Every structure is written in structure tokens, then in C-alpha cells.
Image (tube, rainbow, N blue to C red):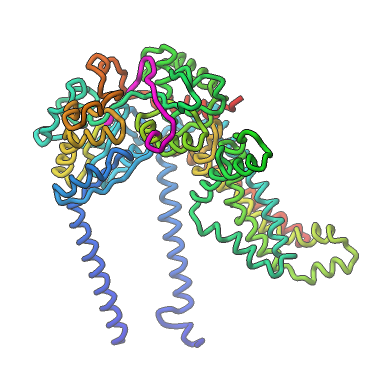
């Protein structure tokens, strides 16, 4: 009996110690900022200085697709403080209540942003600002320069590259093909217009080696020689060049583009720190490093003051206001389910 | 010793009761509740920005209205059937060899069969990319040997590569239970069959095989269900037309934000799997009755 009582006391003492450890780690969590972002957008080069400046730890979780972070946000209680959301899903995230309204008084660097990005409607609801536009790009065509000599969107439908073409496994690809076919309202296509896009992509199927999902996957498809061209991201081209692959990219005739913005996740317990982070990510010296590393455009033109002459040559950052205004940025797709269904029909159809 | 078993904190009765509670709690928390949640949500509706509780059959109607879903299910069933057939034949042959002829190699073969199970599923699928790719081991070796001039592209990113990888991954699920069943067959049965004049093939088909059918069926059921619902392998090794049902289900829970429809698809998958397991059990019972001469 005495032994039993002693064992019970020891057991309870162990439980109490465990509980204290758990509570301690929860309290310690206040000094940790958890961010959900894309690989390449949260490099040590600019994350470590933020950690040192604020005496915090930034825990980075990388997503491979838009599906991943939307699923995490929709599940609720994700524990993340900030998230990077693409322009076509921003309205969904705001209206579904996945993200917090921002306090612009805590974001003095917001004034650094190009005016054509600072006022976009899809980052607002009523008079409240929810997102901070940070990165942008057109959707280029990445190609292997050893095999392909001329680059245009036609390349992705050229029969000589049978089973050597890849396409991004994302509904925005339907928008790219729709633009190529001359369709005007690419995010609100009619059934007839969607059918035209589907027919074109079915015609393309014998040329398709893979519909790729993540940056890592398409980079591997190029490095292993499986594919020679794809609709793509500048990051992919940049990464391939860094790996020594003979790769380059070109812009389609009427490019579609995207804007990725930082948001604060609903229920973040680190609101002030999250605002600090968003503000930090708008610093020209920080975005200068990010631009050079990723190849993406950034929303702060003053990065050129922090880069050597010629560093931005040939990049999207050389574009002028007229070009930026001409880009059709990805917007909300009201019938996303229908678009997804059409893409699944394309993927399920047998390649002849 | 025996007196201790019937009393105290860890009496047999109490252990039995605690086990039953633990199993029931596990089944409730990790099986019944999640599936009930998915089942309920499958009747809900999605608006533009939100999911609304309702009781509507719209999601199920959509599954039957659009041919793409039956097409994807057919593709998944076909892939599962090929994998099951290949795993069954190869797994059975391997198990038979290990139980009958391997003798001192038995332990080594068992180890070779089980060691891959200790590595990640993802790794076991991914390794086939390295083997079958354009610049992979197989193409490089064949080109070095002068067998081919250009790399073969049909080895990877198609149904063949999915089936090959899944067969490799799931082979132990057939081979191990069949091996265990064959090991348990008394040698006297086989000897008696031979003494009564049955040739080896007749002994196999009338004595050995019927006694291993329940184990084979359990392996077949597991392999079919796992192959049918697999997501990783088609995502890694599938080509432009190898989308499977799990890939479609998962796409509804992401950017599409259509959890109700995704739930309806998941319930559809569950129904197919339950039907398969029930059918397999019936077959097993029939085989059992046939053996006992009922």
C-alpha cells in the first residue's frame, strides 16, 4: 500500500513536471513567428537578420502548391502567424475569414510599394487592407536552350516535342491557354469558351510528359532531361540556371501574371510581431536580395538603390508602368470548381 | 501464480475489459467520428466563400452527372486490379518458394522482403524515378550495353510505372501472409496426397492451394484497397493521363475549397472499399465451407 502510494506520488509528480514543460514551451512560443510561405521566399539571407533584430525565431513551413496553404487555413487553428497568398485566392481567403485586417499604421514601408500594386481591390474588403503585395511575375515559358531554339507559347503545342512538354498542374494554366486562344475574360469563361480550352489541351496531350505540381518537381524534370519546355515561374528558370542547366525563359505575347501578398493568419497570437515581419518584407534592401535570389519581380521599385548597376537587366523589374498595367493578373475564379473539373477531365482523358 | 492471475489490479477479466474499452475508444475516435464527420459534410453545400450546413444530395448527383468521376474511378480500379494480379502471382510464387525450397535462404529472403517495409513509402515510390527515368539507371545501362540508341521514355510517367512501383511496394502484403499459411500446412497432408497417387500439380491444386486461399484473399484485399486509394505513387510516377481518385479527392480540399464535394467523393471511395472487403469475406467464407465439405 505504501509502495503504491509512493508510486502514485511519483507518477503525479512526473505528470506535473511534464505539464510545466508543456506550459513553458507554450510561453516560449510567444518568441516564435510561424510563417507559411513558398520555398525561395524565406531564405536565411533575410530571415536570419530579422530573427537577430527582433530576438525571435522564425519557423518556416514551405508549401508546394496553392492547395496546401488553402487547406491549412480552411482547417482553422493552423498556428501560423503569416501566410503568402496568390492574387487569385486572396478574395476567397478574406471573405472566408482566414486572415486578419491589417493595421497600416504599423506598416510604414507600405508606402514603398508601386502605386499600381498598393491599391489593388482584391487585397481589400470595405475600407480595410488585408494583404501586403510583395512579389509578382508574369507566367513565362521556361525552355531548354540546347533543344529549343525559338520561344513562344506556340512551342508548347509543337508536335516535334512529343512527350517532352510539361504544363503546370494548376487551374491558372487554363487561363494561359485561354489567353493564347484569344479569349478575353479568362477567369469567368463561358461553358463554350472552357470547351475550346479543353479541346486545345486535349489536342496537346500527346506532347505532355507531365502535369507538374511543385517547383522542385519541374526543376527535376528539366535536369533529368525529361522535358524541354513548360509554362512556368521565373524562379524555376533561375534555379535551373543555378544548377547549370541550359535554360532560359520568354514571355508569352499577352502575359498573365500573379501577385503574391503577405497576410496575417486569423487568430495569430503574435499580431505585433507579424506586422513587424510584413513591414520588414517591404524593405528595399530585403527585397533586393529576394529578387536576386528568386528572379521574381517585387513590389518595391527602390530595390535598385541596393543593387549594383545592371543587376536588374533582363528582369521583370525593368518593365514600365504601361507594361505592368497591361498584365492580366490572376483574379478570383468564381467557378473554380468548374475549372478544376475541366482540368481533371483533361487529365483523365487518354493521351492518343 | 495462478492465484495471482485471478485478482488484483491486473486480473485477466480486468485486462480483457480494459482492452475492449481501449479498442472501442480507438475505433470511435479515429475511425467512426472522422468518417461520420466526412459523411455529414458530404451533404453540405459550398457557396463562393463559405461552406453551408445543409442536407442536399447535390454533391452525389454531381458525381454521377459528370463522366470524369466514373472515368477516374475506372482508371483507379484498373490500376488496382493490375497491381493486385501482379502482387498475387509474384507474391504467391515467392511465398511458395520460401516455404518449400528456400531452406537455408529462407531467413535471407524474408529479410529482403521485409527490409523495404522499414523505409518510407515515399522513398520506395521515388526510387523508381531513379531507375526508370530518361537518364535513369535502366536507360543508362541499356545504352552503355548498346541495346538501345535513345533512352526509352515509356518506362516512366505512365500506368506501367505506377503499377510497377505499387507491385514492388505491396508485394510483401501478399507474400508474408501466404508464406505463413503455407508454413502451417502439415507435411503429412502433402505426403498423404503423394502416397495416394496424386501428381505434384494435383497435390498443389487440391491440397496446398485451398489451404492458403484465406491468406491469399486477405493479402489481395489489402493490396487492392491500398492501390485503389493511393495518392503518392500516381502523383510521383503517373503521366499525363494517370489521375486517380485520391488525387481528385485531395484537389477538392485545397484551392477549390469544396470540402462537401470532396467528402462526397471520399464516401464514394469508402463505399467501393467496403463493397470489396465484403465481397472478399464472402469468397473466403465460401472457400472455407468448400474445404469443410458443407
Residue at x 30%, y 23% (from the top left corner): A314
Quarter location, residue B252: top left
Residue at x 21%, y 47% (from the top left corner): A48
Q: Horizontal and vertical percent for residue B74? A: 60, 35
- Which residue, as the protein is rendered here, is positioned at the far right? B197
Quarter location, residue A266: top left
Question: Vertical placement of B66 versus A36: above or below?
Answer: above
Quarter location, residue B78: top right
Q: Which residues are magenta?
A: A241-260
Report how many numbered discs are placed on residues in the image. Answer: 0
Decide whether residue A243 is among the magenta residues: yes
Q: Is residue A301 left or right of residue A37?
A: left
Whether residue B253 appears in this view of the structure is no
Residue at x 20%, y 37% (from the top left corner): A286
Q: Horizontal and vertical percent for residue A91? A: 27, 28
In front here: A330 or A229?
A: A229
Q: Is residue B248 left or right of residue A7?
A: right
Decide whether residue A332 is among the magenta residues: no
In front here: B34 or A219?
A: A219
Q: Quadrant of the C terminus of chain B?
A: bottom right
Q: Horizontal and vertical percent for residue A173? A: 42, 24
Amino acid at each position: 500500500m505504501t509502495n503504491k502510494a509512493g508510486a502514485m506520488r511519483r507518477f503525479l509528480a512526473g505528470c506535473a513536471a511534464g505539464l510545466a514543460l508543456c506550459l513553458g514551451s507554450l510561453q516560449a512560443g510567444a518568441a516564435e513567428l510561424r510563417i507559411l510561405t513558398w520555398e525561395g521566399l524565406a531564405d536565411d539571407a533575410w530571415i536570419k537578420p530579422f530573427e537577430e533584430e527582433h530576438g525571435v525565431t522564425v519557423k518556416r513551413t514551405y508549401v508546394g502548391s496553392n492547395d496546401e496553404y488553402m487547406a491549412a487555413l480552411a482547417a482553422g487553428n493552423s498556428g501560423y502567424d503569416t501566410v503568402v497568398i496568390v492574387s487569385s485566392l486572396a478574395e476567397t481567403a478574406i471573405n472566408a475569414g482566414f486572415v486578419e485586417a491589417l493595421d497600416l499604421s504599423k506598416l510604414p514601408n507600405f508606402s514603398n510599394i508601386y502605386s499600381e500594386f498598393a491599391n489593388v481591390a482584391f487585397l481589400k474588403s470595405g475600407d480595410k487592407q488585408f494583404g501586403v503585395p510583395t512579389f509578382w511575375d508574369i507566367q513565362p515559358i521556361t525552355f531548354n536552350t540546347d533543344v529549343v531554339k525559338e520561344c513562344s507559347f506556340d512551342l508548347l503545342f509543337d508536335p516535334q516535342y512529343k512527350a517532352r512538354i510539361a504544363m503546370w498542374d494548376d487551374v491558372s494554366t487554363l487561363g494561359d491557354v485561354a489567353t493564347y486562344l484569344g479569349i478575353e475574360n479568362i477567369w469567368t469563361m463561358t461553358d463554350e469558351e472552357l470547351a475550346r480550352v479543353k479541346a486545345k489541351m486535349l489536342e496537346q496531350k500527346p506532347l505532355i510528359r507531365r502535369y507538374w505540381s511543385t517547383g522542385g518537381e519541374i526543376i527535376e524534370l528539366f535536369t533529368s532531361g525529361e522535358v524541354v519546355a513548360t509554362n512556368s515561374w521565373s524562379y524555376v528558370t533561375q534555379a535551373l540556371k543555378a544548377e547549370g542547366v541550359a535554360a532560359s525563359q520568354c514571355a508569352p505575347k499577352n502575359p498573365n501574371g500573379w501577385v503574391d501578398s503577405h497576410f496575417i493568419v486569423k487568430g495569430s497570437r503574435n499580431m505585433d510581431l507579424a506586422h513587424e515581419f510584413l513591414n520588414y518584407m517591404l524593405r528595399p534592401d530585403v527585397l533586393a536580395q529576394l529578387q536576386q535570389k528568386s528572379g521574381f519581380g517585387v513590389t518595391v521599385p527602390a530595390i535598385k538603390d541596393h543593387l549594383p548597376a545592371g543587376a536588374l537587366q533582363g528582369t521583370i523589374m525593368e518593365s514600365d508602368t504601361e507594361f505592368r498595367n497591361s498584365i492580366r493578373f490572376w483574379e478570383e475564379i468564381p467557378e473554380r470548381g468548374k475549372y478544376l473539373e475541366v482540368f481533371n477531365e483533361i487529365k483523365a482523358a487518354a493521351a492518343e | 501464480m495462478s492465484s495471482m492471475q485471478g485478482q488484483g489490479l491486473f486480473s485477466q477479466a480486468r485486462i480483457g475489459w480494459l482492452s475492449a474499452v481501449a479498442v472501442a475508444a480507438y475505433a470511435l475516435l479515429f475511425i467512426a467520428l472522422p468518417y461520420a464527420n466526412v459523411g455529414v459534410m458530404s451533404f453540405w453545400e459550398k457557396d463562393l466563400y463559405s461552406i453551408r450546413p445543409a442536407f442536399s444530395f447535390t454533391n452525389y448527383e454531381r458525381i454521377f452527372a459528370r463522366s470524369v468521376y466514373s472515368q477516374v474511378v475506372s482508371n483507379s480500379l484498373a490500376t488496382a486490379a493490375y497491381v493486385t494480379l501482379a502482387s498475387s502471382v509474384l507474391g504467391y510464387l515467392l511465398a511458395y518458394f520460401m516455404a518449400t525450397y528456400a531452406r537455408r535462404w529462407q531467413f535471407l529472403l524474408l529479410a529482403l522482403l521485409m527490409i523495404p517495409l522499414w523505409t518510407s513509402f515515399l522513398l520506395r515510390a521515388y526510387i523508381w524515378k531513379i531507375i526508370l527515368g530518361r537518364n535513369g539507371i535502366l536507360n543508362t545501362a541499356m545504352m552503355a550495353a548498346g541495346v538501345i540508341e535513345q533512352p526509352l521514355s515509356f518506362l516512366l510517367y505512365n500506368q506501367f510505372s505506377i503499377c510497377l512501383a505499387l507491385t514492388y511496394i505491396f508485394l510483401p502484403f501478399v507474400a508474408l501472409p501466404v508464406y505463413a499459411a503455407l508454413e502451417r500446412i502439415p507435411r503429412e497432408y502433402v505426403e498423404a496426397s503423394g502416397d495416394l497417387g496424386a501428381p505434384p500439380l494435383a497435390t498443389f491444386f487440391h491440397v496446398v492451394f485451398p489451404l492458403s486461399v484465406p491468406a491469399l484473399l486477405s493479402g489481395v484485399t489489402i493490396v487492392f484497397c491500398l492501390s485503389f486509394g493511393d495518392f503518392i505513387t500516381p502523383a510521383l510516377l503517373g503521366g499525363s493521363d494517370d489521375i486517380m481518385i485520391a488525387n481528385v479527392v485531395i484537389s477538392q480540399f485545397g484551392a477549390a475549397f469544396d470540402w462537401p464535394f470532396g467528402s462526397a467523393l471520399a464516401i464514394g471511395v469508402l463505399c467501393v472499399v467496403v463493397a470489396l472487403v465484403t465481397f472478399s469475406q464472402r469468397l473466403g467464407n465460401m472457400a472455407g465451407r468448400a474445404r469443410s465439405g458443407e
